[in-house]
Amino acid sequence: MSRSKNIPVLGRIEITDVAAEGKAIGRYEEKIVFVQHAVPGDVVDVQVKKKRKNYYEGFPIKYHVYSPIRIAPICSHFGVCGGCKWQHMPYSEQLKFKEKEVYNNLLRIGKIELPTINTIIASANQLHYRNKLEYTFSNKRWLSEEELKSDIEFDNKNALGFHIPGMFDKIIDIDECFLQAEPSNSIRLSIKSYAEKEGLSFFDLRKQEGLLRTLIIRTSSTGEVMVIVVFFYNDTQAINQLLLHIQNQFPMITSLQYVINQKGNDTIQDQEVILFTGKDHLIETMENLTFKVGPKSFYQTNSLQAYELYKIALDFAQLTGNETVYDLYTGTGTIANFIANKAKKVVGIEYVPEAIEDAKLNAELNNLTNTRFFAGDMKNVLTHSFVEQEGIPQVVIVDPPRAGMHTDVTETLLTIAPDRIVYVSCNSATQARDINLLDSRYKVTKVQPVDMFPHTHHVENVVLLERR
């Protein structure tokens, strides 16, 4: 190990595996070394950026050996943009590591007896699979090391792209993103070009000033396109001219909307969304169901894989048509509405009131009369009196946020003791923790990982728990 100004460089570290959050790992003496942008099989010199008692974190500064599984990333922004950190690995290898993560978490954190884990379900599309992207305008784009070292004065530092990981005020200007299909890239580039030509001000994230703030593009499997431009203040003429430009350049846009957001943060959940032209929603379809997706609606960002995920949840639920089903953390009720025709009654609970309104609207849109939706904190809504009122469920489906379930919720599940619990999770670590809490009364009988986000370390996992 060499040192420069007390910053160590670890020489010839062999990368042997992938750890949590997608970081590659090797070893130096008795310590684990977490390495960005490396692949198992690489041998690298690592510049340490964080040193702890039991581990190092760093990035490669020299490659002695390139892994035989390493491939060239398709995106020119790879390594800077934090969106697709595994593009340098074949998709088949990505799936292996995701499967392994699910297994390890369930075994080590869950400490439970496991059945054979089903082979992960791959995404049919590894590129252009997202139906929603949000871009940020900035007047201080991120400059590369080469640009910083050059003598060039950069007069134009405008950017329309993504945040650099760990830097709230640095935005990488995106040339082409492979996450969302056209017309997404064309719309973004056209808006940036028009804004610069017309001298519209890009947002300053530190000073909180500038007209153009964020851009949201949503697409649907039915071919509809929604564009939402978020402005920091109301310049009626500039806003109308920009929106007219978008409308004229992209007649395929079915919903063009805008927001005036003067808050300190970018979320539009508490803001008025103003319709400029077209409809105020998109239409998504799944089997014989129709879903209205508004500018604030949550909908799984990989539409095709969402269908696969919901089919698994339905299969694990083993419904005969006579069951009362609780769908906890129901969101906009997509799973609840998807399974409703196979159940006697479905009860959905969700923290966000606007999401529950979407759930009710979509149930009505699909003529579903056996669904009931409730808004509120899960641990406060799911009480014994609530269960007495709505009926004891034979099946409970849970799809909590990454933090998992509150212990009050797991205790209530143990008390009401449904025959089956179908646990859908975007974080197998917290899923494993919760399953451990349920282990006294429930046995895991099926495990099915699903890849919703190719080229990232994220993996969905569906577990069936059956009462002992």
Image (tube, grey):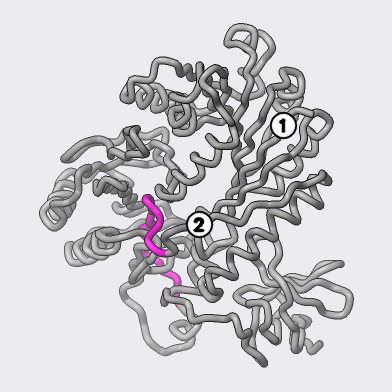
**CA distance separating discs 1 and 2:** 28 Å
| Mark 2, secondary structure of its residue | loop
Where is the C terminus found, in terms of image quarters? top right
Q: Which residue is mark 1?
A: 466
Q: Give left or right: position of 204 versus 312.
A: left
Where is the N terminus found, in terms of image quarters? bottom right
**Residue at position x 34%, y 32% in the image:** 289
Q: Quadrant of residue 38?
A: bottom right
Q: Nearer the viewer, residue 453 or 75?
A: 453
Please say if 398 is above or below 196.
above
Residue 113 placed where, x, y %?
A: 81, 45
Q: Quadrant of residue 37?
A: bottom right
Instruction: Report if residue 14 lies within the magenta region.
Output: no
| Mark 1, secondary structure of its residue | strand
Q: Nearer the viewer, residue 293 or 41?
A: 41
Q: Foreground mark, 1 or 2?
A: 1
Q: Quadrant of residue 17?
A: bottom right
Q: Residues within 10 Å of mark 1 (few under 14, many from 20)?
A: many
**Residue at position x 71%, y 40% in the image:** 445
**Residue at position x 41%, y 60% in the image:** 125
- Residue type pointed to by label 1: Glu
Q: Which residue is mark 2?
A: 453
Q: Which residues are magenta?
A: 127-143
Residue 273 placed where, x, y %?
A: 30, 36
Instruction: Report if residue 139 lies within the magenta region.
Output: yes
Residue 204 placed where, x, y %?
A: 39, 58
- Residue type pointed to by label 2: Phe
Residue 142 placed where, x, y %?
A: 45, 71
